Amino acid sequence: MKLLPFAHDIISECGCNNTPIVGPSLVKESNSLSKNMKFHIENGISLYDNYFRAGSSAHAHLIREGRELWEAGILNVAGMDKELFETTDLGKFGMYEGKEVMLDFPMVEAEYQGKEVPLGKPKRGGPKKYYVYVKSDSGNVKKVTFGDTTGLKAKISDPKARAAFAARHQCDKKKDRTKAGYWACRLTRYGKLLGFGKNYPGYW
C-alpha cells in the first residue's frame, strides 16, 4: 500500500524512514473499539498507512483513538506507529482559530506579523541558532528561538551526547511547546530539516 503524503512528511521528520510498517494488535479485549479501529487491527494495517484521506475527520480520529488505547495499555503498536507515538504528539489535539486540530500535523499554517508561516517546523537563523513558530494557548502565534550561541556544536549523531543532554536538561519534563527547552530537547527529530543529514527519534 502506498503511504499517504501526510505519513511521508511525519516519517521524514521523526527519523522513522527505515522503521517497518506494522499493524496494531490488542493487548486485552475492549468493547470501546470503533469499526475503523477493528478493521485496521484485523487486517494488520498501520494507523499511519490507513485508508483515510490525510487531514480528514476519520483520519484524525483513528490516530487519536489509537493513541488513547495505546496509552491505556489496551493496544499494542509496533514499527512506525510505535515510533511516532513515542516521539511526536500525533494523536493529541489543541485549539487553533477556535477549532480542534491534531498536534504535530505538518499541514497547518498560520499568520505571524502579516505573513504565512508553518507551525512546528524548526529552521536555522534568528538571534539564536534556530527558531520555530508555535500556537500558544491564548491562540496567538509565537516565534520561539532556541539553540546555543557560544559556538558549541550539536553532536546529535553521538548517542552518549544525546543521552547526556536529555538527562542534564530533564527533557522528559519539557512539555510546553511555547518554550525554548521543549524544542532544544527535540532538536534531533529535525536533523535533516536543519542540515544534520539524519533524524533521530526520541529526545536530544
Image (spheres, rainbow, N blue to C red):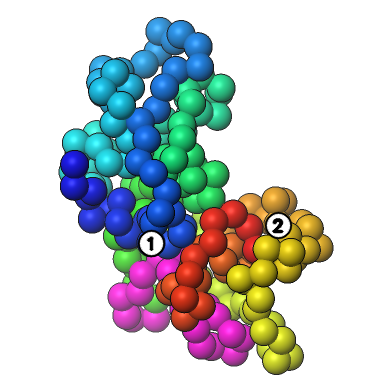
Q: Can you identify the residue that label 2 sits on?
A: 171
The region drawn magenta spans: 113-131
Which secondary structure, mark 2? Answer: helix
The spot of residue 93 in percent (x, y) is 44, 43
Front position in the image: 24 or 177: 24
Q: Is residue 129 visible?
A: yes
Amino acid type for the residue under numbered disc 1: Ser
Front position in the image: 149 or 178: 149
Q: Looking at the image, which residue is at 31% across and 75% down?
A: 116
Which corner quadrant of the image does residue 35 belong to? top left
Q: Looking at the image, which residue is at 44% across and 17% down?
A: 26
Q: Check if residue 14 falls in the magenta segment.
A: no
Q: Can you identify the residue that label 1 sits on?
A: 12
Q: Is residue 80 above or below residue 67?
A: below
- Measured in 3D between alpha carbons, the distance from the residue under mark 1 to the one under mark 2, in whole angstroms, is 22 Å
Q: Is residue 139 left or right of residue 183?
A: left
Which secondary structure, mark 1? Answer: helix
Q: Is residue 82 above or below residue 34?
A: below
Amino acid type for the residue under numbered disc 2: Cys
* Residues packed near mark 1 inside 10 Å, few (<14), some (14 to 19) or many (20 plus): some
